[in-house]
Image: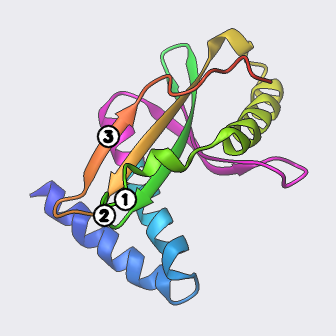
Amino acid sequence: MLGLLYEFADTLRHHGRKRHMTADHALGRRGEDIAHRHLQRAGIVVVARNYRMSSGAGEIDLIGWEKETLVFVEVKSRHTDEYGAPDRTIGPQKQFSALRAAREYARHAEVPWENVRFDVVNVVFTTPPSVVHFRDAFNSSAV
């Protein structure tokens, strides 16, 4: 029952977002909503969404805590996985950008870099949406 309420709320928010966002941007935000709930159910406390560096150069979709670990999450959403899993689009440039933004956030939050992890959540809009969470998806020592 609660799942149906969340799905209904997602649909309403999505339609509202489509009025002032591109369709792809609205779909990405809907994927972030779904990923946010998925992470909460997995025990990760989400503390920030869409964090941008002060320079505007990099962005992190979701940031959360899992015990003593600060988790930076990239969310990739697609209508279908016909052309492969959504996370396949995360290349070296995106990883570098995410690492830079994460460094800035961790520095401001005074979190040691050893307590940082990068996850990826794929959301494919099947019925119901398919969510796959990849823990420790890429190396945090690249920057």
Q: Which is in the foreground here, disc 3 or disc 2?
A: 2
Marker disc for residue 83? 1
Viewer-closest of 108 and 75: 75
Q: Nearer the viewer, mark 1 or mark 3?
A: 1
Q: Which mark is residue 132?
A: 3
Q: Find disc 2 in the rendering and name its residue.
A: 80
Q: Is residue 105 left or right of residue 8?
A: right
Residue 132 image position (x, y, % from top left):
32, 40
Disc 1 and disc 2 in contact, CB within 8 angstroms: yes
- Quadrant hosting residue 16: bottom left
Residue 73, disc: none
Amino acid under disc 1 = Tyr
Looking at the image, do the residues carrying marks 3 and 2 touch, with CB atoms under 8 Å apart? Answer: no
Quadrant containing the N terminus in the rendered view:
bottom left
Q: CA distance from mark 1 to mark 2?
A: 8 Å
Q: Position of residue 90 (x, y in %)?
A: 58, 45
User: Looking at this view, is 90 or 2 the one in front?
Assistant: 90
- The reply to whether callout 1 and callout 3 are in contact (CB within 8 Å) is no
| In the foreground, 108 or 130 | 130
